[in-house]
Image (tube, helix red, strand yellow):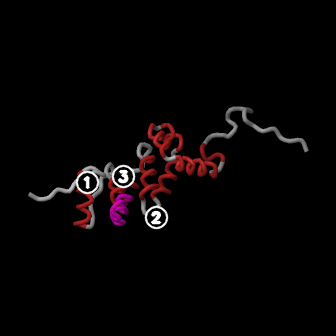
Amino acid sequence: ALPQVSVHETQPSVFRKMLQFLYAGAVEIEAEMAPELLALADQYMLPGLKMLCGFALRRSISVETVIRIYQSADRFDCPGSELKEQCLAFVLGNYQDVVRHPCWEELTRSPHLLVEITRALAMRPRDGLGVSPHASGSAGRKRARDP
């Protein structure tokens, strides 16, 4: 009997996809598998596979997926791929919808990403969110000092 190797860090289908890449040099990557495959490619130091995962993830950015992709890009993505920056731009451009989606709560596990989003929002023009900073009337306004 042939010896068996147990791999516990990923699903068998994801590991098979990595093996296909190793043998063929290219694979078709489904968006659902891309975050886990990106982590595996990072673990096994396969920059070509990481790049392919980044392409698959970039095509699948949506309100439902952007937070998970943003977290994966932050943790595993290749420098210079701009996947993380594209996710941030998507969040900023679709802020109201992303914040209302249940996936937003996943950012509690990545507080540094919440800080990045908050800083990026603060650097945008005031009308960038479509919300006036003083929409609630005079509450929270500072009084002007006397000269």
The residue carrying mark 2 is 79
Residue, disc 1: 7
At mark 2, the secondary structure is loop
Q: Which residue is mark 3?
A: 35
Residue 53 among those drawn in magenta: yes
Report the side of 25 relative to 45 (left or right). Answer: left
List the single residue furthest toward the left: 1
At label 2, the amino acid type is Pro
- The percent coordinates of residue 71 (x first, y second) are 45, 50
Q: Residue at x 45, y 46 (%)?
A: 67
Label located before the other in sequence (1 or 2): 1
Using the rendered view, name the quadrant where residue 55 is placed. bottom left
**x then y, percent, for residue 141:** 75, 37
Tag nearer the camera, 3 or 1? 1
Relative to 74, 38 lies left or right: left
Residue at figure coordinates x 35%, y 60% from the top left: 43
Q: Residue at x 32, y 48 (%)?
A: 32
Residue 10, image x, y percentages: 29, 51
Mark nearer the viewer, 1 or 2: 1
Q: Tell whether position 147 is magenta.
A: no
